[in-house]
Amino acid sequence: GYAGHVNYDAIPGVIYTFPEVASVGKTEEELKEANIEYNKGSFPFAANSRARANATGNSEGFVKILTDKNTDRILGVHIMGPNAGEMIAEGVLGMEYGASAEDIARTCHAHPTLSEAFKEACMDAYDKPIHF
């Protein structure tokens, strides 16, 4: 067999609390410490129609995307809110394949879904969210 390849920068972490917390990649503190210029995009679940419409009324939290200021490549994703542990996979996939925030934002996301908050955060990182 072949030796496996593991990208340790693309390993997600999830805390199964209420609300859930999930992250992958760099934090703002790590980027500042490394003197990496970055853009930040965020989107609150309170502005997401699916989060507001759920029977539990669980619209607490946000999605935050950190991207390289020059290339727009995704460097970190941080989610606090409903289904964060499921949603982080989109960030992991994007980071693993070198996606930019614009790549994710231009990808069609079903409506109404929680993942639209991910798309909107990406839009905020490179341009602006449209549903806020």
Image (spheres, helix red, strand yellow):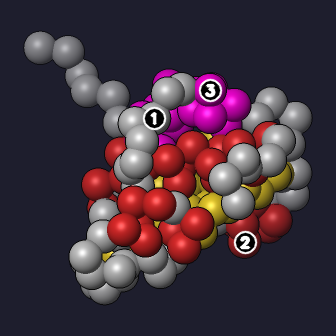
* Label 1 sits on residue: 109
* Residue 81 x %, y %: 42, 73
User: What's the residue at 45%, 35% (across, down)?
Assistant: 109
* Residue 62 x %, y %: 55, 69
Residue 113 lies in the magenta stretch: no
The quadrant in which the C terminus is found is: bottom right
Distance between the alpha carbons at the discs numbered 3 and 1:
9 Å
**Residue type, label 3:** Arg
* Residue 64 x %, y %: 62, 61
User: What's the residue at 53%, 26% (across, down)?
Assistant: 107
User: What's the residue at 27%, 81% (across, down)?
Assistant: 56
Kindly give the residue lying farthest to the bottom in the view shown: 18
Mark 1, secondary structure of its residue:
loop
Distance between the alpha carbons at the discs numbered 2 and 3:
28 Å
**Residue type, label 2:** Glu
Query: As displayed, is residue 42 above or below residue 104?
Result: below
Q: Callout 1 environment at 10 Å: few (<14), some (14 to 19), or many (20+)?
A: some
Distance between the alpha carbons at the discs numbered 1 and 2:
30 Å
Mark 3, secondary structure of its residue:
loop
Query: Residues in magenta?
Result: 90-106
Q: Earlier in the sequence, mark 2 or mark 3?
A: 2
User: What's the residue at 57%, 32% (across, down)?
Assistant: 104
* Label 3 sits on residue: 106
- Image-based side of 103 in relation to 127, left or right: left
Kindly give the residue lying farthest to the left in the view shown: 1
Query: As displayed, is residue 55 above or below residue 104?
Result: below
* Residue 10 seen in this snapshot: no
Please tell me which residue lies in front, 38 or 52: 52
